[in-house]
Amino acid sequence: KKEAPKGRAKAVDLVTGKTVVEYFFDPTLVIDDANKSKKGQNPNDILLNSKHLFVPCKIIKSLKEDGTSNNGSNNSNTGNNKKKNKGKKKRQSMEDASDVNSGPALVKTADGTLYKVKAVHQMAALTAPDDYIGMKDVLHLANVSEASLLHTLRVRYKRDDIYTSAGPILISINPYKLIKKFDGESLYSDDIMMSYRSGDTFTDEEPHLFQAASNTHLMDSVHIVPHLEDDDHDVMVDGDAPLGQAPGEPRNQSIIISGESGAGKTEATKYIMKYLARITKKKDVHEGLRSPDGKIASSLEDRVLSSNPLLESFGNAQTLRNDNSSRFGKFIHINFSTDSGAIVGARISNYLLEKTRITTQIDGERNYHIFYQLLAGAGAETLEKLGMDGGASTFRYLGSKTVEKSEKDASDFAETLDCLARIGLATGDQQTVFALAAAVLHLGNVTFEQDEEHVAKVCEDTLPSLQKACELMGLEQEAVTEAILTKNLSINGKTIKKPSTVAMAEDKRDAFAKMTYSCIFLWLVKSINQTLTVAAKNNGETKVGFIGVLDIYGFETFEVNGYEQLLINYCNEKLQRHFNRHLFEVEQNLYSSEGVDWTYITFNDNRPCLELIEGGSGTVGILNTLDDSYAGMGTSAEKDVKFVNQLHKLFGSGTGTKKKDGHKYFVTPKFGNDRQFIIVHYAGEVRYTVDGFVERNMESLTNELKDLGASSTVELAKSVFSCATSDQEVTQKNDTRRSSIRGFSVASQFKLSLQALVEDLERTQPHYIRCIKPNLRKAPNSFAAGDILKQLRYSGMMEAIRIRREGYALREDHQSFYNRFSVLLGPAEIEGEAGIEQLVNVLSKRLNVTDADWQIGHSKIFLRHDLSDKLERLAALRVHTAARTISRFGKFVLHRRLSKLLVAWARFRLVMLKKYKRVRAATKIASFHRSRMEVQRYRADRKSVITVQSLQRRRVAIQRARKIRDPYCDMTYQDIKDLLETEKPKLDEAVNAKDFKKAAKLEAKIDEINKALDEREPMTRKKLEGLIEKCQSSLDDALKRKSYTEAGPLQEELDALIAQRKDLPTQEELKEAVKTAEANLAEAVKNRDFAGAASSQTALDEAKAKYAIAKEAEGADDEGGEAEAEEEKQGVAIDGIESRADLEKEIGKMQADVDDAIAKKDFKGASALQASLDERLKLRVFFPSVEELEEQVSETKKKMDQCISNKDFTGAETLHADLEKIEKLLEAEKAKEAEKPAVATPSSFSVTLIDGETKEFDSRHDLEEAIKETKTKQNDAVAAKEFKKAEAIQTLIESMEKLRTNLPTIDDLKNDIKKKQAEMKKAVEEKRFSDAEALDKEITELETKLSKEKEKAPEPVAPEVLASKSPNVSSGPSLKSAPTVGNRSQTTKPRMSATLVGGAKVPKTPPRGSLVVTAKTPSGRKDASDDVSDTVSVKSFKSRASKVSKGPAKTPSKKLDTMAESRPVSKLRPKKPLISSTDDSVLAITQMLASKRGDASLIVSNEGGLAGIITDTDITRRLVAKNLNAASTSASAVMTPNPTCVSTTDSAIDAMSTMV
């Protein structure tokens, strides 16, 4: 029996108990049912396209017994040999049962798929346990092969371990998702960073980007003793350091991240930079760095991190394979101090931005991110300023396609702004950068057309785009137009301007746009470098090294590959060449120079492919051929054909084959060879289509376009455009093949940039990170084994793993190795000549190793990885053993010294223990007491809390139980009714949709709702009649059956139901009650019985409420409801009045009529109208105002809230119904008020004069003066016997006199102000603040009119006050001239007399109530008629007024007016005045008025002048209302100052008008 080979996986089948060996499934060994291998297919394609590539499989049975041979042919047996073969098969099956590991067999994969393979022994077996657990370093696998490597990556990828080590190379597989650890922590968190910061080689941490970055950090290679296991430490600290570094100093490091587009290179770069910034950031807070303009900016670490997303915005774009593909190469130099290890600066080197993407993109790809970020994240104002408010569809450079604004672009734009601010760029400079980017898009919209002379010119409809682009760049439109449409040719020292064709103009436009965007990008890189390198200058660091991180576009291959793909793949070929050289050539050259016995490893050398592309070793090169194809005449397409034909001539042969005598990496395609060619790259064959190659390679950038930037009016734009000149100078200096005619080609610039990049990498110690794309769909958790294997092959991973595994991966100088491991030698072994050879011999015998495990070179010793691990551990153990010996001796000495000290200490301790014992006991008792008190308090609180919780749970449980018993327990009858109405349509919809299952559920639910509705239906008359009918039928049935025992209770129940009819009247009865109440109300109003009307209104409201409740309970038909609603809407109308607004409108109208009647001296009509007005005023009780309704609403809400707080929900419901009615009335009243037109009070009035002119009057004084002047003119006309003119003037005078009612006098205005103030005071006392506010506005208007009137007509001099029966009183000055007025109160003050200015004595006791007001006569003396007999009682004013009003019925109008005007005030016989002093108390004055039966008292000052007047109204408002003390309040505080006076000679009509 054959045993399973050593190292294979041995598993036991649980059913059979046999050992099971698993193999890596090889798809190339599969045979079909006919036992024939698949033919016609490339084995490599079969291998890579299988979904079970190298997955574990196990053998089900051997196929030898079926006659299948190892090579796949059938063993046919003849009929004669069947018996012989039968016996052979039995013996063979017994042998195969023990060994089925050879020949054809049936295998099954883990997912149950069965395959027939032709040779089991050709499949690699799994090694336990390495191939099952997924080793974190594939170099530790027992058997390294493509199958084991791929399966290890598959196992680790499934458990989200995306990083795997292959010695110094880190393999990273893009997960396309966010990965978190088991505890939910991010894979890139701060704690994870610091865990890799230790730099411990023996750490159990999984491979990570942070581990690779930590290996490059100088702190880990300078200040920590290097381990042998660290493969590159001997190179990092190399004696032959380049760049002038002293021996032993650390070498500059570089991290080269490579892989296909979309493999995660850019993200890996971000995390590495974040790690380096984090571990070197200082804890102390220092002042931020400063930008070139001197502004405070962020810290250096933050700037380094900000540079990456900023350059991504301007240099990355979305491609078919990657949403964030780098379209430029960047090599980030992060400078570190070799002493402290801190970041001291940084610098970014960029390698040729992909300019062709600015103007053209492949379908499915986008332009650079910054354009879409601007459209999605900038504000509307900014977009309008930049001319980008039309969206992406308006720009040709963005494909003229509509692009939806994404949240990611908006957030990225915000991050871009933040990064610009971090690098110290001011807001204005940021806007300038965005303006230049927008100008590039506007340039793309400029189109050209031919004129009559076939010369290009700018299309008229695109001139706004050109104008906007020039405005944003600060350039003159004429200069840009001339530079694009013409070309300057220098011939014999003369400059000739040659017009451009349309094609040439378009090329120049695109070249100018490319130059502008490239300048923006170069300026950003320059600005970033300035802000990142300023710190190194300030710190003055002398020893500085750097770690470079390379992020550049990955290998690309599409269905149609163009010029961009050629340059990108050329770049990757260059980097692959560097990788091969470092890992293979340098390694093998080192072995040869050291004299180490070594077997050379063959690897895929791509140097011939590079020579094919860039030239060398006698090869012209594709790029040079492309540069030469620009020369000559012809169109762009003809030049492309010329270029591809030249390639086929130089490098190709027959179609579809490689030229034997030509270049082996160039293939001429079978079809389309006039437009295509194939290059065999390290990653595979790529077919290139040459459409546009020559045009894209040469930039049509003339000197005129280059010099435009210097003329910009924007300073920052000048600086940006200057980057083009400096970049061009560098290219001119390095390119020796430049042609002055064709300019600089893109390929030449790209080639020079790559050479500079490779030179930078050659001067550093590289560290490689190979990024792998798991699938082409960018889907997470999808492991496409074929695609991954292809990437592993062309990246050279297998060769790298092989050379690291089979070679001597670790090496160290002889002296350093001896110093570190001589501790493993014993004293006897060191005697004599001790050296590196003796150390190796002794350790070889001790460890039982051969010379194949390590070799001694000329200057270094080379070891394999396993042996180095053993030596490191043995040295560590020897050091630990020596340390323990020294420690034991030290402890012995220490113990002896301490023993004495301990004895003394013990004695002292015994004494102190007694002292402390009592203290501890007291402390313990106190603490126990406090603890007990706290426990008791806690238990009491806990008991209270439990009680509250139990009560609350009980309440919740009761509610839940109630809800379970009755799901509608918390719903009212109306709520259940509304729910029923919402569920019925759902049932109909379910039936119509034939969803009978849903309909059944809804029907059951509706039945439950109907049941709950029936239980909660309120008792109505209709329901009562139904119960009576039901009870009557039951009673009749019982009587019919002569069941009198049942009849008794039924009869009682029937009587009780019939008795309820009184409480539940029918709707007809209630409606009749409403009509009766309305009739009673109308009748009461008609009879002016307002008290009865109020009670009728209450009865009507109650009847309506009962009717509404009955209607709501029983439901009414729609017609009846509409009629009643209309009837309720109309309400009760009284004399045609339906609302308060109508009433106030009619009151205002009637008030105007009364005023008009008074103005016309129609006092009888005014009296009748006043009576009607009073009746209308009484109707205000039945029509509340908006303020009253609002007050009722507020009071009702308060009552309702009080009912709710008192749990009186029945009362609250009644108040809610009342509230709704009041609110309806309030809304109706507000609507009526809104309909009421606003009355505009004119500020002036006008009349038409005789000459046709219009004269306006805005004051009473002007009007009176005009009337006097007009009357004078009338008198002159009468004197001149011009009666017609006098009649016209009379008409004018009458028109003017009519205006007196609209222009009040000063006294009228004062009276109106006092009246309004009294009304406002009353409104405030009654809490009617809205009315008070309106009155306040009216008072303000009146005061304005009063001040205006006073300015034009100063207040007249007050008349003199004389005693009625004093014959010695003579005319004298007015009261304002401070006359002396006598008669102080006899009750409280001593009598006193005063003398007027003329010497007349005022009687000490004037007659009661007499008030005589005199005025000067024309003769200057007192009229004889002004005596006591001419006084008239004020009480007779009304009778006199009534008599005068009755006059017009008997006397003609003119005569009456003449009599009224001629009758003076003295004929009214006014009362004699009562006089008091300002010092008299209000109590004394009221007692005097009561005793004398007076209405008012004049108040004179101490000087004898008239100070004011006091009436009962003044006492009520200013004393009683303010609750003042009458005895202590003086008259001056209550009186009305400066009363209006009239003369005894004034017209009575004017006096009465003043009084009114």
Image: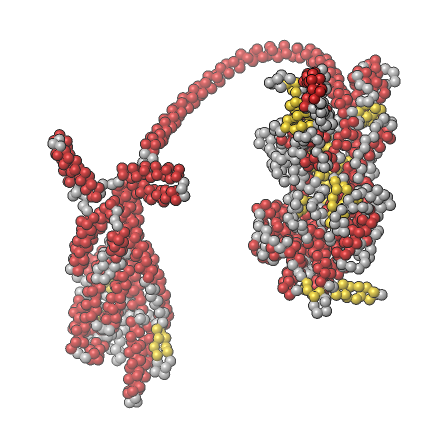
Residue 1471 on image: x %, y %:
19, 67
> Residue at left 26%, top 47%?
1115
Tell me if 1439 is positioned left or right of 894 in this view.
left
| Residue 368 shows in the view | yes
> Residue at left 82%, top 49%?
649
Residue 710 on image: x %, y %:
73, 59
| Residue 1094 shows in the view | no
In the rendered image, which quarter is residue 1243 located in?
A: bottom left
Tell me if 649 is positioned left or right of 118 in this view.
right
Residue 1084 on image: x %, y %:
16, 57
Tell me if 625 is positioned left or right of 1330 in this view.
right
> Residue at left 67%, top 56%?
440
- The foreground one among 25 and 728 is 25
> Residue at left 39%, top 44%?
992
- The foreground one among 321 and 1354 is 321
Q: Residue furthest bottom?
A: 1281
In the rendered image, which quarter is residue 132 located in?
A: top right
Which image quarter holds the N terminus?
Answer: top right
In the rendered image, which quarter is residue 908 located in?
A: top right
Q: Would you place residue 156 above or below residue 653 in this image? A: above
Q: Would you place residue 911 above or below residue 1276 in this image? A: above
